Image (cartoon, grey):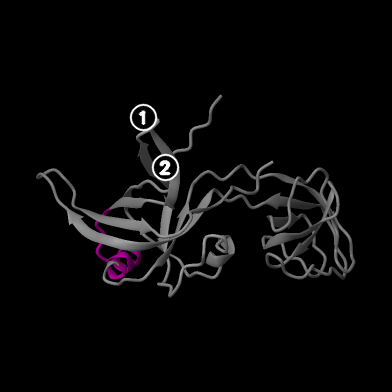
Amino acid sequence: MPQLYPVAGAKIYIGPAVNTVPDDADIDATDFASVTWTELKGWQTMGAIGDAATLISEDVISSGRTLKAKGTRNAGSMQNNFIIMPNDPGQIALIAAENTDFNYPFKLAFDDAPPVVSGTATITIAAPGVVTWTGHGRQVNDPVKLATTGALPTGLTAGTTYYVKTVTDANTITLSATPGGAAITTSGTQSGVHTISTVPSGTTKFFYGIVMTAQENGGGANTARLLQGNVEINSPVITVAPVGGA
């Protein structure tokens, strides 16, 4: 059966202005990793995003046909509405961005995270510590958390998010404290039953854009005033798929 993906639950964020936007071939999710994000609250309408090609056409007299080709790509104008929240830091940032000529990073976070997947884990005392989780299905940099009925080895803390450092095989992994960081060495003693779980996250989209409008929309007596924030997307839209599922 087809799966519907509601817009409800999605969030939009804006970051500080940037001096330059990377070339299409160079841009990826890592460009947005260090951005300090501010949520734009009161999001009422989400505008369209994504590339559309410009049509090139020429009418050829001799063949009596119009020939067509794809031209440049345009990621569009995202036309958003927000219920007015005068003290919201995100809306304040959007209004301030409209007063500049700079590009700003944006993030969309969708509420489509998969269910948590858990299993029993055994952990070696070694450099690095090796976690056995039968049929784990994980990939490098996937986030996970540990829990225990007793005590974890030194180097690991229950409830802390760790990241898969290496996937040794279908049943074993090593962990790091940060994505791409050094593998964690375990030491000391341990006790109890350990459980390892995924830390699911939903689809995330990143892009750079120019804020073109920050207007108030009115209407009739029974209409709420809205802040219209239109963003001209000035880069490819980078999509990060949900993680943490089975």
Q: Nearer the viewer, mark 1 or mark 2?
A: 1
Kind of residue at badge 2: Val
Q: Nearer the viewer, residue 174 or 188?
A: 174
Give whichever of discs 1 and 2 has the lower sequence position: 2
**Dot 1 crowding, Cα within 10 Å, few <14, some 14–19, many 20+:** few
Quarter of the view holding residue 31: bottom right
**Dot 2 crowding, Cα within 10 Å, few <14, some 14–19, many 20+:** few
**Circle 2 — which element?**
loop
**Circle 1 — which element?**
loop
Q: CA distance from mark 1 to mark 2?
A: 46 Å
Q: Nearer the viewer, residue 195 or 133?
A: 133
Q: Which residues are magenta?
A: 82-97
Which image quarter is the N terminus in? top right
Residue at the spot of label 1: 64
Residue 96 locus on image (x, y percent): 29, 70
Residue 111, relative to residue 176: is it above or below? Answer: above
